[in-house]
Amino acid sequence: MISLDGVSKTFAGRDSSVEAVRDVSLRINRGEIYGIIGFSGAGKSTLVRCINLLERPTRGRVFVDGVDMTTLSEKELRLKRRKIGMIFQQFNLFASRTAAQNIAYPLKNSGLDKSGVRDRVRELLSLVGLEDKENSYPSQLSGGQKQRVAIARALANDPGILLCDEATSALDPQTTLGLLKLLKNLNAAFGITIVVITHEMQVVKEICDRVAIMENGRIAEEGEVFSIFADPKQRITREFIDTTSSLSKIYGLIGGDSPAVRIEPGECILKLRYLERSVSEALISTISRRFGIDADIIFGSIELIGGAPLGGLVVIARGGPSGIDAAIGYLRQKNVGVEVILDARGVSELPDSERDVKTAHLFQVNR
Ligand SMILES: Nc1ncnc2c1ncn2[C@@H]1O[C@H](COP(=O)(O)OP(=O)(O)OP(=O)(O)O)[C@@H](O)[C@H]1O
Ligand SMILES: [Mg+2]
């Protein structure tokens, strides 16, 4: 288990300093795949480098399997780091060494003799599906293959933890999927704990069990991936989720003033997220029956997150303002995530002369 306890990291410059990580506490369980997502500069790399103490925290403590990393001597740290593999966006392979030589590198002081090293390297090459690339140099490999070599090298000493810093960011979507699958298989086969840094929510959705969303050096939100997708609490989390959801097309339509989303005074546009596939029909008919409101569906979607279906709807709701409020309250009570995306309810209270001016600025856009 990895446990960070009030970890902060400040980089002091001559004239100014940067607080890259601010008071972060989190726990990563053994055998889980944990995502850390955030925009550039959020502090993700710095935070993860605090786990193996490539960065020494300015404050706080870092425990790996119960050992306080901040108290270890350099020698003890070196030994401990052998059990924490790491891979990077730019692969960091030795250009002048073959795939096999790159993978053999961390086995130097492992106590294995020459043939032991050769066997282990072959085993690792086969683990990442590169049996035939033993003698290829990095320049002769594709990006995906280079990252596989880097993974094999990171696993050479049988680490319990693998840290992946933007490991798929330089790769195309297809290659990314292949690598994520490999990481997932390694996790399932060896129970290896994997920490995945990314700025792509798709990566989190594909393989992570839990995720932390980082902003300005802090954890903005943290939890099971499914609950985060089903019911994001923070604005930044919603922004990341929107990048993977077809429902977020609604914002483009609103921005482009599409006729499909032009609403009348008294109406509003709602985005709903809920857990089971079957409920969408029932939800809409229940709220119209109980609260006397109409709901036109603009978009609907079902996504699989960690194998569980997550439904989503974008609807235009119309009816009395109190009816809409009551319906929203009811939906939330039923654990449906409700976001009011565009709200023209206040508009109907304007005098007739102004009511005709249906320009966007009359509506409150909740983004
Ligand atoms: N060695 C350093 N010296 C000074 N400042 C640093 C150092 N490393 C990182 N920083 C600063 O700390 C902040 C966080 O950087 P970090 O690399 O952790 O962000 P990140 O979330 O990994 O970003 P990216 O997605 O671009 O990789 C940034 O403002 C960065 O400039
Ligand atoms: Mg980084």
Image: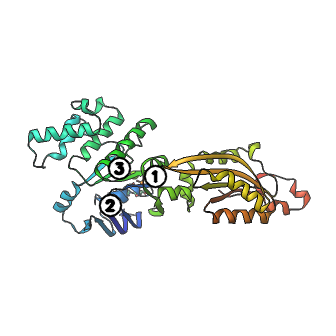
In the displayed structure image, the side of residue 198 where residue 309 appears, left or right: right
Ligand 1's quadrant: bottom left
**Which dot marks residue 50?**
2
Which residue type carries mark 2? Cys
Residue 304 in the image: state x and y as whole percent: 52, 47
Assess mark 1: CB under 8 A from ligand 1?
yes
Are the residues at dot 2 and dot 3 in contact (C-beta closer than 8 Å)? no
Mark 2 residue crowding within 10 angstroms, few (<14) / some (14–19) / many (20+): many
Tell whether 76 sits left or right of 360. Answer: left
Q: Quadrant of residue 51?
A: bottom left
Q: Quadrant of the N terminus?
A: bottom left
User: Mark 2: which secondary structure?
Assistant: helix
Residue 292, by quadrant, is bottom right
User: x%, y% of residue 345?
Assistant: 78, 60
Distance Cα–Cα, label 1 vs label 2? 18 Å
Front disc: 1 or 3: 3
Which mark identifies residue 164? 3
Q: Locate residue 145, reporting x and y percent.
A: 32, 35
Q: Coloured how?
A: rainbow
Task: Indicate whether 244 appears above or below 81.
Answer: above
Mark closest to the chain's N terminus, 1 or 2: 1
Q: Earlier in the sequence, mark 2 or mark 3?
A: 2
Mark earlier in primary sequence (1, 3):
1
Side (left or right) of 263 relative to 26: right
Along the viewing direction, whichever of 299 and 147 lies nearer the viewer: 299
Residue drawn at point x = 25 percent, y = 65 percent: 69
**Residue type, numbered disc 3:** Cys
The answer to whether one can see residue 164 in this image is yes
State the residue position of label 1: 40
Q: Number of numbered discs present?
A: 3
Q: Secondary structure at mark 3?
A: strand
